[in-house]
Image (spheres, rainbow, N blue to C red):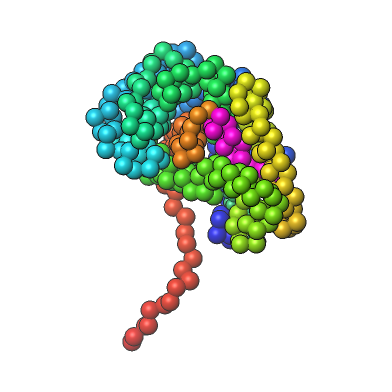
Amino acid sequence: MANGLDDVVAAETVLSDVDGAGGHLTIRGHSLTELAGHWRYGQVVRLLFDGFFDELPGDDELEKAIGNARVEVFERLQPMLAGLPALDVYSGMRAGIALLPDGDSLADALRLIAAPAVLTPALLRLGRGEKPVPPDARADHANDMLRMLSGTASPALAKALDTYLVTVSDHGLNASTFATRVVASTQAGLTSAILAGLGALKGPLHGGAPGPVIEMLDAIEASGDAAAWLRNEIARGERIMGFGHRIYRVRDPRADVLKAVVRRLGTRCETGSRLAFAETVEQAALDVLRVAKPQRSIQTNVEFYTALLLEAAGFPKEAFSNVFAAGRVAGWIAHAREQQATGRLIRPKSRYVGPVPDLVA
Ligand code: ACO
């Protein structure tokens, strides 16, 4: 058995399916391309939550309930916010979420949907010495997140962020979703389960990659030779951020969705030349990886164009994983509820390979 549980089926789910050979993502019967850019994030929350909560309202009512939850979370956590910017913005968000009630109701779930969207802009502003902008319950989720960040939200950027949140809302049994399900299987509350997901998402082999993608692009730009820089990284045993995936053997379909969003933004703002440069780096990375790792099909993953999209939306690179969490939290909650409903504790075995005690007669 491989250390990474490769190919082990550890759950049955109705939520999403990742076809790694074909490069397709299905979320509750809908292809990613059907959802991204066409459904609002609030609608996808409803799609994922359907059947996992009693009395789930319709799309418009749920959107309003998410707005009210943003206001509630802001008011509840505002007194504690001043102490959190001492932490990095991801740890600050996680600490804020840990202060929320740990129940299983729809109200608990909506507070958790709201929390990353509210805490991330508030902590970024406090870190810059600015006052947080309170949420507007009537605004669309992505729009309000941008408004809380910078005071305004252009429709184009709000649409781009909304498409991003939808694109990353769920993705099979990835590391953070598995961690969430393990905690949920103990019948702990949703906040405990989501904290487990947040812990797993942070690492650079999972949702912590897009910040380092920006650092890589900046370093390559400074070096002036993408291929040489990338070859040197591989020679030093480093991984190229934004490339490779456990399941996908072809291009991650989310990369194309997000690249198209960045391309559309490029016609409206300064992202055009950044995109052209990133495309050159992407091609160089694919060429270098093909030569360096011929035994493995290493392709562009979601994080490469996530970095460009979130940079264009005005988020600093240290907050990229927060925004990922703001989208993925919908999937985590649905998976936690699905796991709780099985009533079955996740408890695998390990094989002991340590020293044996001396058996003294
Ligand atoms: N750069 C260089 N080499 C790589 C990369 C990469 N991005 N990805 C895999 N490899 C190499 C490994 O070094 C290994 O080489 P070896 O056999 O010579 O030792 C081989 O490919 C297989 O590596 P594994 O770790 O078994 O591959 P796995 O499929 O488990 O890795 C992972 C998936 C962790 C995402 C990996 O591709 C990686 O580290 N990528 C960079 C970080 C990144 O982009 N993370 C975001 C992933 S997307 C997401 O989680 C939302």
The spot of residue 325 in percent (x, y) is 47, 36
303 drawn magenta: yes
Residue drawn at (54%, 16%) of the image: 155
| Left or right: residue 56 compared with residue 274 | left
Where residue 120 sits in the image (x, y, percent)? 40, 32
Task: Report the residue at 58% width, 60% height from top.
Answer: 2
Question: Foreground: 92 or 1?
Answer: 92
Relative to 221, say whether 273 is above or below. above
For the magenta stretch, what is the residue range? 298-312
Q: Main secondary structure of the magenta part?
A: helix
**Quadrant of the rendering where the N terminus is positioned:** bottom right
Residue occupying the point 38% across, 27% down = 118
Return the x and y of residue 112 as percentages of the image width and height.
39, 30
Q: Residue furthest bottom?
A: 361
Magenta residue check for 81: no
Residue at 52% in and 42% down: 211
Do we see residue 174 in this rendering?
Answer: no
Q: Quadrant of residue 115?
A: top left
Horizontal side of 128 relative to 3 (left or right) equals left
Residue 354 at what x, y percent from top left? 44, 73
State how many labels appear: 0
Question: 15 or 283, which is in the foreground?
Answer: 283
Residue 331 drawn above or below residue 62: below
Between 40 and 22, the one nearer to me in the picture: 40
- Left or right of 40 on screen, residue 223: right
